[in-house]
Image (cartoon, coloured by chain):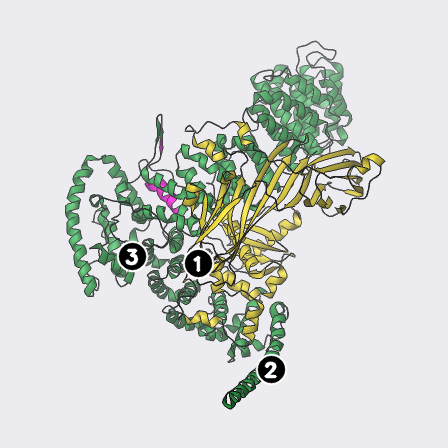
Amino acid sequence: MSMSGQYLNTITENASRLGMRLQESFSEHTRDLNLSRATGSSYLEGDEKLKDIRRQLDSNSDREKLDAMKRLIALISKGRNVSEYFAQVVKNVASHNLEIRKLVYIYLLRYAEHEPDLALLSVNTFQKDLTDSNPLIRAMALRVLSGIKVPMIGSLVVLAIKKCAADISPYVRKNAALAVPKCFELDSSHLPSLIGIITTLLNDRSPLSIGSVAFAFEAVCPTRLDLVHQHYRRLCKIIVDVDEWGQVDLSNLLLRYSRTMLPRPIVKADGEEVDKDIELLLSSVEPLFQSRNPAVVLAVTRIFFYAGPPSYLFKIVNPLLRLLSSSAEVERIVLVYVNVIARSAPHLFAPFFARFLVRTDDLLQVKQEKIKLLLVILTVDNYAAILRELIDYVDDPDDSVASDSIQGIGRCARLVPESTQQCLNSLITMVKSARDVTISSAVLVLKHLVQLQLSTSSEFPGTSQSPFKIIAQLAQKIDDVHHAQARACVIWLVGQYAASEDKGPGPEGVADWAPDVLRKTAKTFAQETPLVKVQIITLAAKLFVLSPNDRILALLSQYVFNLARYDMNYDVRDRARMISSLLAGVIPTSLMEDSERERAGVVLRREQVKLVLFEGKSGIVEDNSGHTDNISPIGTLGLVTGKSMQLEGMLSDWLENGVESSLRDVDESVPPPTPVALSSAQQQRVRVKEMSPIVLTPTGGSSLDGSELKDGVSSRGLFQDLDKFYEDTESLEEEEDEEEEEEEEEEEEEGSEGYGEDDDGDGDATEDNEHDGSIQEFNGEMSNHPSSTTDHTTLS
Amino acid sequence: MAIDGLIIVDNTGRPIIQSGFRSTPPSYPLLHIDALNNALAKTPGDVDPVIYVSPYNTVSAAACCHVKCGDIRILCPVSGDVDPLFAFSFIQAFIDILNEYFGSVSAATLKDNFDVVYQLLEETLDSGGYPLTTSSNALRDIVLPPSLLTKLLSVAGANITSSINSGSGLGSGPFSSPIPWRKAGLRYASNEIYFDMVEELKAIVNRNGTTLLSTVRGTIETNCRLSGTPDCQLSFANPQVLADCAFHPCVRLKRWSDSKILSFIPPDGRFVLAEYRYAPNQASASARFSNTTVPATTPPLNLVRDHVALPFTLKPAVELEGNGGNFNITLTSRLSTRNIENLVAELHLGEGAGGIKCVTARGGAADRYGRGVEGVGASWAFDSNKKILRWEIPLVSPSSSWSLRGSFTTLIPAPRPSHAMQIRFEIQSHTFSALKVEQLKMTGEVYKPYKGVRGRSVGKVEWRW
C-alpha cells in the first residue's frame, strides 16, 4: 500500500509539474500565437522590419527564417524587387523544414535568373535531393532545377530529367516530362537527348504521367508523330484513366496523330468507311464526354468534329449543350465553338434552338453569339419561333444587340421566304420607333431587302407587297427618321427608285412620293449632317434627270446645288460641283449661271447622265452572315478573340490514305514494366508476323553488365528472327498498293525533315533503318535505367 | 496546352498574388492587369470574360481570361492557340481548392494566408504553366491547410511539416495512395456520407405566359467522411430521369452506362459526384438519336420540348409613358404544399430611371378593399447604380399571391426598361426531377456508415412582358 501510495504521490507530483510546465509554455506560446496570427496580412502591409530580414535569414531559429521568408514573399507579392537577399536565401535551400524550403524555392524560381552564379550554389542540394526517398522531394528538386533559368546547368538538367524519367513514382515521372519543355526553352541544343527522354516517357504505363508527356511532346517535338506509332493504341485505351488536364493534351495529340497518320473516313452511298484505329480513338474518348471539366469535353468534341465520320457527329450535341449551362464564362466560349460547328452542320443544333434563346441578363458577347447562332440554325420548322424572339430582342437595352437582331430579321426574310411578310411588317413598325439605333438598323435592313428583291424580281415572294410600296412608306416617314445614316439611306432609296412609268399627280417620269422628299429635305438642308447633304444632292440630281422638264423640280434642284456649293464641308461642295457639271447637258440654259455656260470638256446627254447616276448600284448587297474565310479550329483562342493569335495551331489536313496500320502494331506479349493499377483496358492480340520493323534493340557498343549482356544477346537473336520476318513481310507488302508505300516514305521524310540534323545521321540507311538507328541510340543511352532494363529482359 | 500564369487581383484592380511568369517579359502580367482594369472602367458590369491584349513591344498578342469570385478576380493570361476553356477550367479548379482550404474566398482571407496560397499555386501550377496537382485530397498532403491547430503547433515549435520530409513512412506520405483522388489511411470515429441533390431550374417565359424553355440541371454534392477505402454503389429508383450526365473522375463510367449504378471509391471531404439534366420525357435526347442512321434526320420539335412546370405564375403589367411608367406585378404560387423561399424578382429599369414609388402587398386583400395589406416580410428596393428594382419575398406560402404596384420616372424622354423580369427562388427539400436514391451499398470496409440524402431546388426564371 505504501509503495503504491508513494507511486501515486510521485505521479500526482509529476502530473502537476507537467501541468505547470504546459501552462507556462502555453501562455508563452499563445503570446507568440497572437503575434503570428496577427501577421498574416500585416506581412503585406508593414515594412518597418525590412532590415531585419537579413539577420533573420542568418539566424538559427526556423521560426525566424520562416518569418523572414514570408516577409520576402510578401514583398515579391507587392511587386518589390528583393533580389538583394539572394545570398542569404540560397543558404536556406537545404533547410530541413519543408515549409521554409518551399518558400525558398518560390524565391529561387523568381530570382535565379538575376544571380546565376549564386544560384549555382544551390544546385548541389537539388542534385542530392534527386536521390531522396520521398517522391515529393525528388519532384520538387527537379522542378526547381529545371525552373531556374540558368543556361549553364543545361546539361545537368538533362541528366536530372533523364534520371527522373526512370523514377519509380509516376508523380516524379510526370514532373520529369514537364521539365522537358523548360529545358528545351532554355537551350534548344539539347533537343536530341530531350527527344530521347520523351521516347522513353512515351512508354510510360502510368496514366498519371502520360498526360504531361503529351504536353512535352507538343512543346518540344510536335512534328515527330512517328514516335507515337507504337503507342497510339495503348494511349487510346488508357486515356479514360488519365487525369483531366492530361486528357486534354493527350486528346489533342491523338487528334493530330490521326489527322496525319490515319486514313480519312470516307462516306459512301452504303455507309461509311472508317479506319479501325479511328474507331478505336472515337470509342475510347467517347466516355470523356461525361467529364466535369469543360476543357476535356471540348477536346473530345474536337476529335469527333475533326476526325470522326459524319454519322458520329450527333454525339457532340448534348455534351456541348450541357457546357452551356455550367458558367457564364464557359457559355461565352462554348457558344463561339457551337457557332462554328453549326455552320457546317446546322441540322445538329436546329432542334435545340430553345437552348440558345437570349436572356436579358446574359453577357453582351453571349447575346451576340446567340443571335448569330439562331440565324445559322434557322429552318423552315423553327423560323416562326426564332423570328418572334428576334423581334423581342430589338427591345434589348444594348444598342448592338438591338441592331444585331434587326439585321437578323433581315436575314430571316432572305433565308425563309415564308417569313418575308412578317419580317417586313415588323421592320416597318420599327422605323416608327423612338430609338435611333432601331430606326437606322431597320432602314438599312429594309434597303438591303428592297435592293435584293429589285435585283431579282419585283415582288417579295409570298407577299403582295411590292418593294416600291415599302420605299413609298419610308419616303412618307422621312420626317421621323432622325438618325443620319438611316436618313441618308432613305433619301438614297427614294432617289434610286423614283423612276415611274405611271401617270401620277406629280411630275411625269417620277413616282408621286419622291418630289415631296426633296422638298422636305431641301428645307432642312442647312441642319443636315454632311452624309445626308450628299444624298440630298444626289436625290436632286436624280429627280431632275428623270423629269428635266418639270420647272419646280428644276428650281428645287438648283436651290439645293446652290446651297451645297457654299457649304462648310468640302465633301458636300465637291459633290455639288461634280453633279452640276455632270448635269451640264441637261440643265436648261435659263437656269445656268454665266460662268458655267462656256465650260469646255465633255458634256453628257440625258441618257448618259442617267446611266451614270442610276446604273450599277443595285448589286451592292452586303452579306452580313459573318463568315470569315480563315476560321481557326474550335478550341483555340484565335476563334474566341476573333484575332489571329498564332497560325501553328491549324490542324493539318488529312493525308490521302494515312500510313500503314502495321506501324501501330505492338508486340503485346511484353508485359508492362510497371503494373497498371486502373486500366481495365483489354489487351489486344497482335500477331507476331505483323510486328513493326522498329524494335528496341540495344546497340552493341553500350556498356553492358551481366544481365544486359544477356538480353543484348537475346534481342540480337530476335533481330535475326526479324530478318526472316522482313522476308515474310516483304513478300506480303509487294502485293499491296505501291502508291501507299511511296506516300508513307514521303510522309516519313517529311516527319524527320525538321530534325534531320538531330538524327544519328546514317543517311545511306533505308527509311526504316533510320528510325531504327535513332531509337537504338536512345536506347543505348537509356540502358542504365532500371525500367528499360526490364523492358529488355522481357523482350526475350 | 498550358496557361501563362495566374494573377489574383482585389476589387480595386490591384494584384494581391501572382504566379511566377517564367517565359514572358516582366511587363506581361502588368499588361493583362491593365487590360482588365481598362475594360472594367469602360463597362463596369458587363465585361467580356476573354479580353484581347494586343501585342506590345516584345510581348506577342494574348488574351486575359478572368473570373470574378467574391471580392477578388482571378486572371489567367493565355497566349498562342490555347483553348480559353482550359484557362477557365483551371481557374475553377483553383477556386475550388481555395474554398476547400479557406472556407471562403475573399481578399482578406487570401491576404491572411498568402504564404499558403503561394504554396498552393506552386503545387497546382507548374512553372511552365501546366496544371500539376488539382485534386484536393492529394494537395492536403503536400500543403497543410491553415488551421488554428497547425498554427498552434508551429508556434509551439513542433515541426509537423518535417514529417513529410522524413519520407520514412512510405505508407502515409504524399502520393502513396494507390487512388489518385483519395487520401490513404483515413480514420473517422463516425463514418458518414451525405448526398445533397441540388437542382437548378432555368426558364424563359414569353410575354404571353408561354414557357419557351425550361431546363433543370442537377448536381449531386457529396460530403464523404468514411474511413479506409470504401467502395460505394449508389442506385436510383428512377434513373431514367437523368440525362447528359457528367461525373467526378472516381465514378466508373462503364458501370453507369451498363446498369445505371454509380459505382465509385469516393474522395475524402466535399466533392461533386455527378451532374445531370432532368429529362421529363423518358426518351432522352440521346436515345432519340440512337436509331437515326442518317444524320440529316432531325427529331420532331415537340419531342425536344420537355418542359418542367414552373412553381409560380407572374402577371406583369407595365405601362410606359413619355417620362416614366407604371407597373402592377402579381405573383401567385402554384405549389400546393411547399413554400417558395427567398424569392427575388428584379427588373432593370434602364438609363436614367428614378423616382420609384411602390407598394407591395399580399394577395387577395388588395383587390377587395382597393388598398394593399402590407405584405408580411415582402420588401422592395431600388439599386440606383445598376438601375435595378428588386422585389424580395422571403417566404411565399402555398397558393398565396403577392403584388407589387408602383411607378417610376426617367430623366431621358423614352424609358427603356429591360422587357423581362429575372426571378430567383429556392425550394427546400424538393427536387423537380423527384430523383430518388434507392440504396447505397458499400463494400471494402466492415463498418456501417451513416447515410444522408437531401434535396434542394433553386430557380432562375426570366419572365418577359
Q: Magenta region's main secondary structure?
A: helix
Kindly indicate the quadrant of the structure image that contains residue A677.
bottom left
In which quadrant is the C terminus of chain B drawn?
Answer: top right
Instruction: Please state the chain letter of the residue tagged with numbered disc 1 in the rendered image.
Output: B
Q: How far apart are marks 1 and 2 (CA)?
A: 45 Å
Which chain does the yellow colour mark? B
Q: Which amino acid does label 3 sit on?
A: Pro
- Residue with the mark numbered 1: B446
Residue B348: in magenta span: no
Instruction: Quickly name the residue at label 2.
Output: A24
Eye-nearest disc, 3 or 2: 2
Image disc number at residue A673? 3
- Crowdedness near tag 3: few (<14), some (14–19) or many (≥20) residues, C-alpha within 10 Å: some
Question: Which chain is rendered green in the image?
Answer: A
Mark 3 / mark 2, whichever is N-terminal: 2
Distance between mark 1 and mark 3 Cα atoms:
34 Å
Q: Tell me residue B384's x, y (percent).
A: 75, 47
Boundaries of the magenta span: A253-266
Residue plotted at (76% across, 21% down)? A519
> Residue A118 placed where, x, y %?
44, 72
Give the letter of the chain under mark 3.
A
Under tag 1, what secondary structure?
Answer: loop
**Mark 2 is on which residue type?**
Glu
Query: In percent of the image, x 28 and y 62: which residue is there?
Result: A786
